[in-house]
Image (cartoon, grey):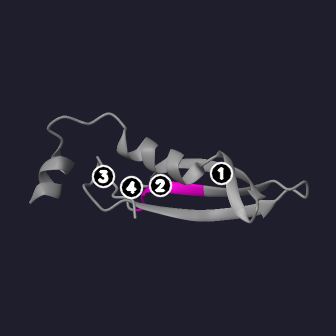
Amino acid sequence: MVKLKPCPFCGGKAEIREYSQGHSGNGDYTARYKCGCDKCKIFFDKESLFRLVDGQPKFEKNGFEDATNAWNNRPEIENSDAEQEGRE
Protein backbone atom coordinates (compact mmCIF):
# COMPACT_ATOMS: atom_id res chain seq x y z
CA MET A 1 0.00 0.00 0.00
CA VAL A 2 1.22 3.49 -0.83
CA LYS A 3 1.72 5.89 2.07
CA LEU A 4 0.07 9.25 1.33
CA LYS A 5 1.03 12.59 2.81
CA PRO A 6 -1.64 14.33 4.90
CA CYS A 7 -3.72 17.11 3.40
CA PRO A 8 -1.73 20.37 3.27
CA PHE A 9 -4.83 22.40 4.19
CA CYS A 10 -6.49 20.50 7.06
CA GLY A 11 -3.83 17.93 7.98
CA GLY A 12 -6.37 15.14 7.42
CA LYS A 13 -5.83 11.69 5.97
CA ALA A 14 -5.62 11.43 2.19
CA GLU A 15 -7.18 8.55 0.26
CA ILE A 16 -6.95 7.09 -3.22
CA ARG A 17 -9.96 5.58 -4.97
CA GLU A 18 -10.72 4.01 -8.31
CA TYR A 19 -13.99 5.60 -9.38
CA SER A 20 -14.38 4.66 -13.01
CA GLN A 21 -13.37 1.85 -15.32
CA GLY A 22 -14.17 0.77 -18.81
CA HIS A 23 -13.27 -1.01 -22.01
CA SER A 24 -13.07 0.71 -25.36
CA GLY A 25 -13.85 -2.40 -27.41
CA ASN A 26 -10.46 -2.42 -29.15
CA GLY A 27 -8.57 -4.15 -26.32
CA ASP A 28 -7.82 -0.99 -24.35
CA TYR A 29 -8.97 -0.74 -20.74
CA THR A 30 -9.24 2.40 -18.66
CA ALA A 31 -9.53 3.21 -14.98
CA ARG A 32 -9.65 6.60 -13.23
CA TYR A 33 -8.19 7.35 -9.82
CA LYS A 34 -8.73 10.24 -7.42
CA CYS A 35 -6.14 10.91 -4.74
CA GLY A 36 -6.72 13.58 -2.14
CA CYS A 37 -8.72 14.87 0.80
CA ASP A 38 -12.50 14.33 1.01
CA LYS A 39 -12.90 16.97 3.71
CA CYS A 40 -11.27 19.77 1.64
CA LYS A 41 -12.43 18.38 -1.74
CA ILE A 42 -8.88 18.65 -3.14
CA PHE A 43 -7.88 15.83 -5.50
CA PHE A 44 -5.53 14.77 -8.25
CA ASP A 45 -7.53 12.89 -10.88
CA LYS A 46 -5.57 10.59 -13.23
CA GLU A 47 -6.44 7.94 -15.81
CA SER A 48 -4.88 4.53 -16.44
CA LEU A 49 -4.74 3.09 -19.93
CA PHE A 50 -3.67 -0.53 -20.41
CA ARG A 51 -4.00 -3.70 -22.44
CA LEU A 52 -3.89 -7.28 -21.24
CA VAL A 53 -0.82 -9.16 -22.46
CA ASP A 54 -0.68 -12.83 -21.48
CA GLY A 55 -3.31 -12.09 -18.83
CA GLN A 56 -1.30 -9.27 -17.22
CA PRO A 57 -1.90 -5.50 -17.59
CA LYS A 58 0.61 -3.67 -19.75
CA PHE A 59 0.28 0.01 -18.87
CA GLU A 60 0.57 2.88 -21.32
CA LYS A 61 -0.46 5.24 -18.48
CA ASN A 62 -0.67 4.21 -14.83
CA GLY A 63 -3.25 6.49 -13.21
CA PHE A 64 -2.81 5.01 -9.72
CA GLU A 65 0.92 5.83 -9.70
CA ASP A 66 0.40 9.19 -11.40
CA ALA A 67 -2.23 10.27 -8.84
CA THR A 68 -0.27 9.13 -5.77
CA ASN A 69 2.97 10.65 -7.10
CA ALA A 70 1.23 13.95 -7.83
CA TRP A 71 -0.23 14.06 -4.30
CA ASN A 72 2.99 13.07 -2.53
CA ASN A 73 5.32 15.22 -4.65
CA ARG A 74 3.36 18.47 -4.51
CA PRO A 75 5.13 21.58 -3.19
CA GLU A 76 5.06 21.87 0.59
CA ILE A 77 3.33 24.75 2.35
CA GLU A 78 5.86 25.99 4.88
CA ASN A 79 4.77 26.52 8.49
CA SER A 80 1.11 26.00 7.69
CA ASP A 81 -1.47 25.60 10.44
CA ALA A 82 -2.42 22.23 8.92
CA GLU A 83 1.15 20.93 9.33
CA GLN A 84 1.18 21.95 12.98
CA GLU A 85 -2.25 20.39 13.64
CA GLY A 86 -1.28 17.18 11.82
CA ARG A 87 1.75 16.75 14.08
CA GLU A 88 -0.13 17.12 17.35
- Left or right: residue 30 compared with residue 73: right
Which residue is pictured at 41% across the width and 46% down the height? 71
Q: Earlier in the sequence, mark 3 or mark 2?
A: 3
Whether the residues at callouts 4 and 3 have beta carbons within 8 Å, the answer is no
Q: Is most of the magenta stretch helix, strand or loop?
A: strand
- Give the labeled residue for mark 1: 48
Under mark 4, the amino acid is Cys
What label sits on residue 80 in the rendered view?
none
Label 3 – label 2 distance at C-alpha: 11 Å
Label 4 – label 3 distance at C-alpha: 14 Å
Label 3 – label 1 distance at C-alpha: 22 Å
Label 3 element class = loop
- Give the labeled residue for mark 3: 5
- Looking at the rendering, which quadrant does residue 6 occupy? bottom left
- Looking at the rendering, the stretch of residues picked out in magenta corresponds to 33-38
Q: Nearer the viewer, mark 4 or mark 3?
A: 3
- Left or right: residue 31 compared with residue 39: right
Label 4 – label 2 distance at C-alpha: 12 Å
Q: Earlier in the sequence, mark 1 or mark 4?
A: 4
Q: Residue 24, position in %: x, y?
A: 86, 56
Q: Nearer the viewer, mark 4 or mark 2?
A: 2
- Give the labeled residue for mark 4: 40
What label sits on residue 35 in the rendered view?
2
Local crowd size for mark 1, using a 10 Å CA cut-off: few (<14), some (14–19), many (≥20): some
Label 1 element class = strand
